[in-house]
Amino acid sequence: MELNSINIHKLKKIPVEGGNVLHALKKSDKGFKKFGEAYFSWINPKSIKAWKKHNLMTLNLIVPIGKIRFVFHNTMYPEVFRVEILGEGNYCRLTVPPNIWFGFQNLSDHASLVTNISDIEHQDSESDKAEINTFPFKWSEY
């Protein structure tokens, strides 16, 4: 799968007295196929979670708290990576089709929260995992 098939969508922050409202995903939004499940993943300061590839699931990734660097990789091009930074300062949704390896790193000094709204329910059998050093991305150089 080509890395340019990953789409980024700016999301609305609506200022409301007492605390902002943050949009995530509507069924009319580009990138929405169908609802499978929504889940949240905390990532500790400066931690890295890598690598994973979903074989069937389309991801819709949002970072409402903190700052996360997402790294995407297509094994057909060993030296090519796509990097996107999402978070409070760049509030967006990434739509990631199946068959793309990815990892992510918390760039904040506090825990960050990643939200995934997927088109199917999670099943361990539909994804593959690899060790952090499987692909030649230099996490410390960015």
Image (tube, rainbow, N blue to C red):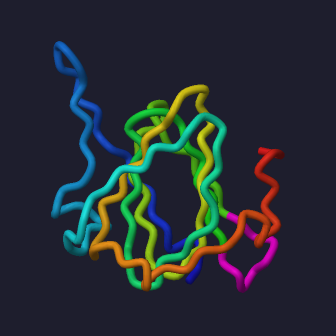
Identify which residue, 45 or 79, lies in the foreground: 45
| Position of 55 relative to 13 (above/below) | below
| Position of 120 relative to 30 (above/below) | below
Q: Which residues are magenta?
A: 74-81
Provide residue 133's location: percent of width, then percent of height. Answer: 79, 66
Quarter of the figure that contains the C terminus: top right
For this orientation, the residue located farthest to the top is 17
Q: Residue at x 26, y 68 (%)?
A: 32
Provide residue 4's location: percent of width, then percent of height. Answer: 56, 71
Provide residue 112's location: percent of width, then percent of height. Answer: 48, 37
Q: Is residue 79 in the magenta section?
A: yes
Q: Is residue 32 in the magenta section?
A: no
Q: Residue at x 81, y 71 (%)?
A: 79
For this orientation, the residue located farthest to the front is 124
| Position of 80 relative to 90 (above/below) | below
Q: Quadrant of residue 126?
A: bottom left
Provide residue 57's location: percent of width, then percent of height. Answer: 38, 77
Quarter of the figure that contains the N terminus: bottom right
Identify which residue, 105 or 4, lies in the foreground: 105
Total numbered labels:
0
